[in-house]
Amino acid sequence: MRFVDEFRDAAKARALAAQITSLCEPGRQYKFMEVCGGHTHTIYKHGLEDYLPESITLVHGPGCPVCVIPMGRVDDAIHIAEQPDVILTTFGDMMRVPGGRGSFLDSKAAGTDIRMVYSPLDSLKIARQNPDKRVVFMAIGFETTAPSTAMTVLRAAAEGIENFSIFCSHVTIIPAIKAILNSPDLRLDGFVGPGHVSTVIGCRPYDFIAREYGKPLVCAGFEPLDILQSVYQLMIQLSEGRSEVENQYSRVVPWNGNPRALKVIGEVMELRPYFEWRGLGFISHSALKVRDAYASFDAEVIFEVPGVRVADPKACQCGEVLKGVLKPWECKVFGTACTPETPIGTCMVSSEGACAAYYNFGRFSRDRVREATSIEITPVPVAGR
Amino acid sequence: MSTAEWAEAAVADHAGSGEHVIGSEHRGREQQVLDRIDKARRRKARVREERITLAHGAGGKATHTLIEAVFLDAFRNPLLERMEDQAVFTLDGGVNGAGARMAFTTDSYVVSPLFFPGGDIGELAVNGTVNDLAMSGARPLHLSAGFILEEGFPVADLQRIVASMAAAATAAGVDIVTGDTKVVERGKADGCFINTAGVGVLERDITLGADRVRPGDVVLVSGPIGDHGVTIMLARGELDISSDITSDTAPLAGLVDTLLSATDGVRCLRDATRGGVATILNEVAVASDVAVVVNEAAVPMRTEVRGASEILGIDPLYVACEGRMIAIVDGAQADAALAALRSHPLGADAAIIGEVKADPPTLVLLRTEFGGTRIVDMLIGDPLPRIC
């Protein structure tokens, strides 16, 4: 299949891995953070760590949009869903995120009308089809998804659709990276930079990471070879004593981002003074809200949102996992009390969450399976393959 | 119970299962955690939810928990405890004295939409039950058909469904010999739901089961996977994707007969319906306490299924088929089994996709096309309700 197979070529991966290994200084340990949850997912789904030498550790970052939503925000959304004539819509990943009073799935089973959509435009369609209902879209995600939410609000305004609003929970990536860099617990050698966010904001906003903190960052694509190549570029920078922002994902990411998308976000949304992130606490200017000019599409204005604050369960160490301080398996409830079917923390819910990725794909001992997986089964040509 | 209270209880429940492992990169520590998880996974299943959610019907982890904690607990008996797709029992005290070995099964069909490319709910209702019987090695004989119809459902649609059931029954060599009809008020059902039950007879002296698999066995699949699930997903028209793909619904009793005639090394047969190939292999790994290792590059799959799965972010290993089966066969007879499957029109694209190993027990491992390793767990949640 084009645009997929060429980025999963095992022979190319072996060649890259050999070059990466040859760049490792003997005795030195390297720690790179992949900021984006999509990268974490790719790393585990394709078993990418099999290619990395033991001296290179990939640390999972905070860029999983579902993982950073605090429990209180889920409760607020359920409160909205419980109001008369409300249809709450959201992305599928949100459905199982536990709030203080259970998840959307639990709330739906108890009688609220919560529906999964693939795009905010689908939500607008539901609003058009149900003029007697109040349709709310719970908007989550970084700058990647904010433009489509903003576009949807603009379209609703243009069409004069009055029964549609958004519960805006969009967050921004740079403050999260700053929080990580300022965290005393973590020593990183560089970043595998977020690819999808960068399609919107470009590569420039990361300059301070290279200049002020002296860490290299390479914006990376989402296929396994993309990530391996980004690690290679980071290793080259380190071996040459450089710290710069580089763009591995240039087939998608323009250096200056997407000005039109940024303009649309800016028209509909503005920065909140502060926002609570799960596990990271309150971070100033780290999230977006609907501008007053579009207040009639803002669920926080239309409904009396209680603004619930729920402390994470004591046992939950999502914060440490989101900051990369703990590997998922180092959390004390990982895999026993907290599993994908009964998650305590958000990192165990989303397919982009580090804990879920590790639990679902990486939960085995590499030493132990080496023998088991050394099989050679010749693939057979099959219809259409 | 609030999430916080529940979390406290869950933690207390697992107390003493291991002290907190701090910051160590040492592989041995990771292994301790993995062992602890393994122990937790072997514990008795409990339903945490207060209400049924769609995940309970998805065929994955939640379905298993519900079956074990609710149904198995209440109905417990040796036949049910085997947890196969059908019960196999011997009839004693017949007039002629000789006891026949019978297979008995039931399944309900709630697919939406009722009509889809390559089939409809009626054909599915016959083939699904025929296949559940066939997976025990039985020759399917008779089916029952129960209809739950919603007030207002077009009679013409019902006639179309029934005609297709009749054709499917003829093709599968079974008769529909008894039935039932109920009508519920508008809004209390979605058009037409069908339940079928079936009986078959085992004419071979064999016992197949997920618990009979051993290291050294090989895993075969009878054809490309995921066709049915992707067809249904696209047929709903909620995604603006179109494709020529059609459901693979088919009766598999003939294919099973061809396989069993060619080799006596078959350990286990399963049709890969809800939860897909991944769920079946997990059931096998747990029931037989073995590792199943799958080579991703060897798994037959149509480009359309792969493409749709990439776009939608779903894993085709979990997508349902309605006319494909997994056969686990003694490694020494792998070639004979593959040749037998390929000699039948429904097995023309059959392939050996993996091997059974002793270690690490209860895990399904995937050697990815990229050349890495990952595990393939039971399905969590429900990517796609009402596919069958």
Image: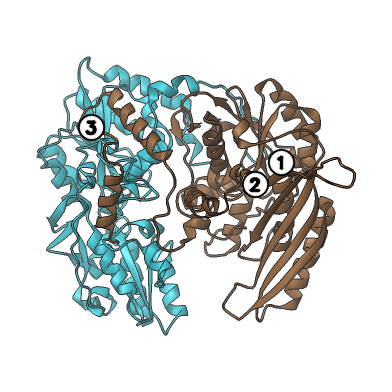
Q: How is the image coloured?
A: by chain
Label 1, label 3: how many angstroms apart (C-alpha)?
46 Å
Question: Badge 3: few (under 14), some or many (20 or more) residues near its Cα, within 10 Å?
Answer: some
User: Drawn colour of chain B?
Assistant: brown
Please tell me the numbered disc located at residue B85.
2
Q: Is residue A345 visible?
A: no
As drawn, B182 above or below B21: below
- How many numbered discs? 3
Q: Is A67 placed above or below A181 here?
A: below
- Nearer the observer, A218 or A326: A326
Element carrying mark 1 = loop
Q: Who's the residue at 77% across and 31% down the image?
A: B340
Q: Which residue is mark 3?
A: B21
Check chain identity for marks 3 and 2: say if they share one.
Answer: yes
Location of the C terminus of chain A by quadrant is top right
Apparent side of residue B161 relative to residue A41 in the rendered image (left or right): right
Whole-percent x and y of residue B364? 50, 34
Q: Which residue is mark 1?
A: B136
**Marks 1 and 2 share the same chain:** yes
Give x and y (percent) for residue A34.
28, 39
The image position of residue B272, as x and y in percent, is 62, 45
Do tag 1 and tag 2 residues touch (Cβ < 8 Å)? yes
Of all residues, the one furthest to the top in this rendering is A26
Instruction: Name the chain under label 3.
Output: B
Chain A image colour: cyan
Q: Amino acid at mark 1?
A: Ser
Amino acid type of the residue tagged 3 in the rendering: Val
Residue kind at label 2, given as amino acid type:
Asp
